[in-house]
Image (cartoon, rainbow, N blue to C red):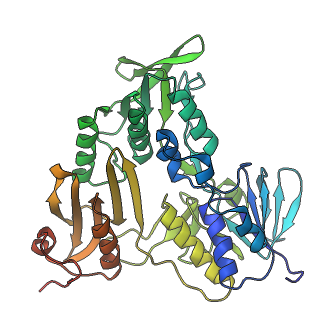
Amino acid sequence: MTNAKPLVIVGASYAGVQIAASARELGFAERIVIVGEEVHAPYQRPPLSKGMLTGKTTIDQLPLRGPDFFEQNEIELLLGRRAEVMDVGGRTVRLDDGATLEYSWLALATGARCRSFTLPGSKLEGVFNLRTLDDALRVADAADRAQRACVIGGGFIGLEVASALHSRGVDVTVIEAQPRLLMRSLPTRMAAYVEHAHRLRGTDLLTGRGVRALHGEQGRVASVELDDGMRIDCDLVVLGIGVQPNAEMAQQAGIAIDNGIVVDMLGRTSAPHVLAAGDVANMALPAAPGAPARMRFESIQAANDGAKAAASLMVGCAQPCVAVPWFWSDQFNLKFQMAGLPLPGDDVVLRGDMATDRFSVFYLRDGTLVAAHSVNKPSEHMQSRKLIGARAQFTAYQLADESFDLKKSGAH
């Protein structure tokens, strides 16, 4: 290594670690420093709302990489430290202890945090967010003693938590303010299937209902009051009301912000030598009819793909991120796998029988496969990702026919 200024990565996240790993793989020879606000070494987050709550995943299974990886690749970890101020002109970052880091490149992988919940009773014991390892440990500990839980928010995290708590013998009510579950994440037909699956397995679902306050007894949560005055008794509340990107430091430095840090398909921000990836990045998308120009994804795959693109730029072999976005969710005995971006107006094609909990829903736009949602059909999900990336053409009849080989793409 030379005495050149290092690559500084703010955020010991999936994106942060992947930027470091990819930079080394591609030949980046200078120092790499990762600054992480948590004291824990970088770890996997999906199990926090899944296996960590069911007991199927233990702490020792969470690390993203072992200590040897960071040592062998000469990647320095500064944990329990927070980056507070960045100077894009002077190419420096100041940490919470007053230390200043110079950089040749700065990568922001600061992720997102839980939205604030400020209603009366939000500070009672037994009320939890779920975003970090420490959060998950607290929820798991509380679940050991809980009999009835309320999950506020009917998105993927809330539903995964509901499933996990149910598996521990806790009665669960999910409260969602929107008219249906997964309003921002899934089209109506798939969301209706998820709702039916949860009801069938014992989750009490209340949609179109707001929360007015939480009430306690002797400092501990005892009930949730809805906007119509109805009260639901509970001894555990988990908040799943969404996240907001940690973009404040970038904004204060004058970097363009719009629901996250605005980046192109290489992770470039509006400031020179400053990149962003992961949940904090609102990334430009490849042009496609009817599709949004950019989107902020909250998924591991998007974080890794964006990180690889950013690393490629730093070493002079720019490879824009054009990967098909995909996501998964485990709930009860159901594995949901989603690829692509469906839009209202797409032709919706069911392949299989929803009642069997093994099927796929495909989305066609002018005959082109643009998205697919699969339940307990991993092989169809994997094939769909390839076909979406290839902009494969099908007829609805072909996709609906389970005897039709998806590898034989091409409508005739």
Q: Residue 267, image x and y in percent?
A: 59, 73
Q: Residue 92's image quarter?
A: bottom right
Q: Residue 227's image quarter?
A: top left
Looking at the image, residue 279 sits to the left or right of residue 404; the answer is: right
Q: Residue 100, image x and y in percent?
A: 87, 61
Residue 133 sits above or below residue 373 on the image: above
Residue 365 sits above or below residue 51 on the image: below
Q: Name the residue: 89% across, 53% down.
A: 98
Residue 247 sits above or below residue 76 on the image: above
Residue 198 at least partly seen: yes
Q: In this orientation, which residue lies closer to the viewer: 350 or 359?
A: 359
Residue 343 at least partly seen: no
Of the 4 image quadrants, the one containing the C terminus is: bottom left
Looking at the image, residue 131 sits to the left or right of residue 101; the answer is: left
Q: In this orientation, which residue lies closer to the viewer: 306 or 71?
A: 71
Residue located farthest toward the top when viewing the structure as drawn: 218
Q: Residue 338's image quarter?
A: bottom left
Q: Residue 118, image x and y in percent?
A: 56, 30
Residue located farthest toward the bottom when viewing the structure as drawn: 317
The image shows a total of numbered marks equal to 0
Q: Name the residue: 62% across, 82% down.
A: 312
Q: In this orientation, which residue lies closer to the viewer: 62 or 268?
A: 62
Q: Residue 337, image x and y in percent?
A: 35, 60
Q: Name the residue: 46% across, 78% down.
A: 322
Of the 4 image quadrants, the one containing the N terminus is: bottom right
